[in-house]
């Protein structure tokens, strides 16, 4: 996967969400392990765009006949910042659940999908209500 031409922060946030849900670990600490040095480096760049300071470690496994494992990690406090960001991304996608629900409780989690139409409708209704209240007070 090559992300060098992708400039959309929303795409990048969604990409991090997908990686974390599929191959990542995020409880007290965020860790993602991969045999792809390129993927690990690109993830480091994406996390840095979120103003985080990831570290990469290499678990050398050649002596076992395996490829090296590249591990990208965040501190506990930065992992919590990432968790909050991923929860925001999930909410923006219209789901009423958290990262933990999707990652660790699926399919047992009770989550609901709110269509973008209903989200837009509720926002529009709220906007219209506030505008009509402003007109009455002016």
Image: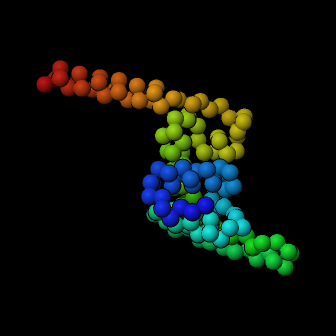
**Quadrant where the C terminus lies?**
top left
Residue 82 to residue 64: above or below: above
Q: Residue at x 61, y 61 (%)?
A: 1
123 or 76: nearer the viewer: 123
Q: Residue at x 65, y 61 (%)?
A: 31
Residue drawn at (59%, 69%), measured in percent from left and top? 41
Q: Residue at x 82, y 72 (%)?
A: 66
- Specify whether 122 is left or right of 99: left
Q: In this image, 124 relative to 21: left or right?
A: left
Give the colouring mode of the picture. Answer: rainbow
Residue 89 x %, y %: 51, 45
Task: Return the residue found at the far right.
Answer: 64
The quarter holding residue 63 reads bottom right
Q: Position of residue 8 (x, y in %)?
A: 44, 54
Residue 107 x %, y %: 72, 36
**On the image, which quarter does residue 122 sit in?**
top left
Q: What is the residue that sits farthest to the left in this orientation? A: 138
């Amino acid at each position: 996967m090559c992300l060098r031409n992708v400039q959309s922060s929303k795409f990048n946030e969604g990409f991090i969400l997908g990686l974390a849900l599929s191959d990542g670990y995020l409880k007290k600490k965020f860790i993602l392990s991969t045999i792809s040095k390129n993927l690990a480096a690109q993830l480091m760049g994406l996390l840095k765009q979120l103003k985080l300071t990831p570290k990469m470690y290499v678990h050398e496994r050649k002596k076992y006949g395996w490829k090296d494992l590249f591990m990208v990690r965040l501190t506990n406090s930065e992992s919590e910042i990432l968790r909050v960001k991923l929860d925001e991304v999930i909410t923006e996608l219209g789901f009423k659940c958290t990262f933990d629900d999707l990652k660790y409780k699926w399919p047992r989690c009770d989550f609901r999908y709110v269509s973008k139409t209903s989200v837009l409708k509720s926002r529009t209704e709220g906007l219209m209500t506030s505008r009509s209240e402003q007109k009455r007070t002016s």
